[in-house]
Amino acid sequence: MPALTSYDAVIVGGGHNGLVAAAYLARAGRRVLLLERLDHTGGAAVSAPAFPGVAARLSRYAYLVSLLPERIVRDLGLRLTLRRRAFSSYTPVVRGGRPTGLLVGGGESRTRAAFAGLTGSDREYEAWLRFYAMTGRLAVRVFPTLTEPLPRRSELRRLVGDDAAWRAVFERPLGEAVEDAFRDDLVRGIVLTDALIGTFTSAHDPSLRQNRCFLYHVIGQGTGDWDVPVGGMGAVTDALADAARAAGAEIATGHEVTSVATDGVTAEVGYRTQTTEGVVGAGVVLVNASPHELAALLVEPRPEPVEGAQFKVNMLLRRLPALRDPAADPREALAGTFHVAEGYEQLETAYRQAAAGELPGTPPSEIYCHSLTDPSILSPELAASGHHTLTLFGLHTPARLFTRDNAGARDRLLAATLATLNGQLAEPIEDCLAVDGAGRPCVEAKTPLDLAAELGLPGGHIFHGDLAFPLAEDDEELADPAARWGVATGHANVLLCGSGAVRGGGVSGVPGHNAAMAVLGR
């Protein structure tokens, strides 16, 4: 039970953003209570044994880190190790009737040679360098602003100082920039995938939701690198929970928040446990849940949830599979992002099929092997015997495809996804799967509806809704601290501190930091 009847701040939800907010506010001397529905903190950023009887702790939902600012790590004194992946990506393809692929990483000379071997010249590699130099310029200017008050659009444009880059990412559909820069369909597809993670859209969507998704995927740490958390994603949230508790925050798991009432000055937060119900007072409430769920807690009309569009598959292998491309080493190809059926035209075809209400016939996905970079998630026995994890993220699988028969659609999509993957392998992935304590294959699949049920994500959307550009419009009112920090809700003392905030999405801690700064009047 909460130790007090009233707190300076009550935080709803113990995901990573709520823990960041709790740590900052407690370090500032505020009395902080965090209430979490589950019996553990971490939300989607957890490590857990996915397969009974197998000593492997997988990052089952979120799995890589890019957007967590060093400022937050430093401010909170987090004990956390992020490890760079040795290779960026490998994309298999058949060219001229033979299996080949594009390996990005391993040094400039290897990458240049890989592009030339695939495309026949240096043209695409030079375009690659120019394109990512452009995104790099955006990254070093935009990323530091995520933990500052919102810049206005004109202010951020001046800060970027590159009109061509600004137009390519902030004003025109990303497909235009991709098609202008690259000629090769496979290379175009590799670039576009960063615009489609958890976002159901196409290259030329006039709403620019693809651009917003792309921006967040290329600016992390000012470099765009996506790193592996040693110990799995749970190591990130465990470090944050430790920091919050060490600062004096009170964390109550198994406490589901049922209501939030506010008059704009004080608030009351209702909760229930397995055995009791209660109410606790708060000066301010920070909500690490979606705007859709917040509306329900406030007994206000709920906005329509934005549907998620990802298919998540976790696997444990007895050994890495051999690839059809005889020149490809699976220890290199699977260490970074392994792109499956993600050519430019393949992505568009899958999008159109899903938009028409059909499961993609050739499901696009991307895979990586955490244990190649960080074997600590496996027991010493599993690691020594050659076991490895595989995490697969499927694209263009919106929640609407699963509403009539979630289990049946899940099974059909899993079969099609594995069959598409097998088309790139020299042996079926099923032959490489480990088995759990009951002799079942170590593979689990999650649809958007599964994520909605397990994690409380409306529509199964991993970002709580479409991502927003990290700015305020020039005519937007920013007099209130919550508005300046992009965490306002319409109630003066109820703030968003989760992915639904203006600069939410991904494992970043940014909304938690920004909500805390708004409370502290920074």
Image: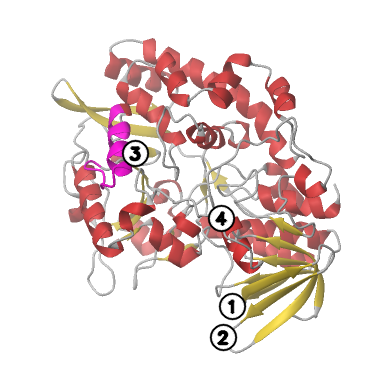
Describe the element under mark 4 as helix, strand or loop.
Answer: loop
Disc 2 to disc 1: CB gap under 8 Å: yes
Sequence-earlier tag: 3 or 4: 4
Q: Is residue 522 left or right of residue 467?
A: right
Residue indicated by mark 3: 338
Residue indicated by mark 2: 274
In the rendered view, tell whether residue 274 sits above or below residue 160. Answer: below
Describe the element under mark 3 as helix, strand or loop.
Answer: strand
State how the image is colored: secondary structure
- For this rendering, which residue is in front, 485 or 440? 485
Residue indicated by mark 4: 303
Q: Distance between the residues labelled 1 and 4?
A: 27 Å
Q: What stretch is highlighted in magenta?
A: 345-362
Mark 3 Cα-neighbour bin, 10 Å: few <14, some 14–19, many ≥20: many
In the rendered view, tell whether residue 326 sits above or below residue 22. Answer: above
Q: How many labels does the image show?
A: 4
Q: Which amino acid does label 3 sit on?
A: Phe
Q: Is residue 385 left or right of residue 195?
A: left
Residue 246: give its label: none
Disc 1 to disc 3: CB gap under 8 Å: no
Q: Which amino acid does label 1 sit on?
A: Gly
Q: What residue type is labelled 2?
A: Gln
Q: In which quarter of the image is the N terminus?
A: bottom right
Residue indicated by mark 1: 254
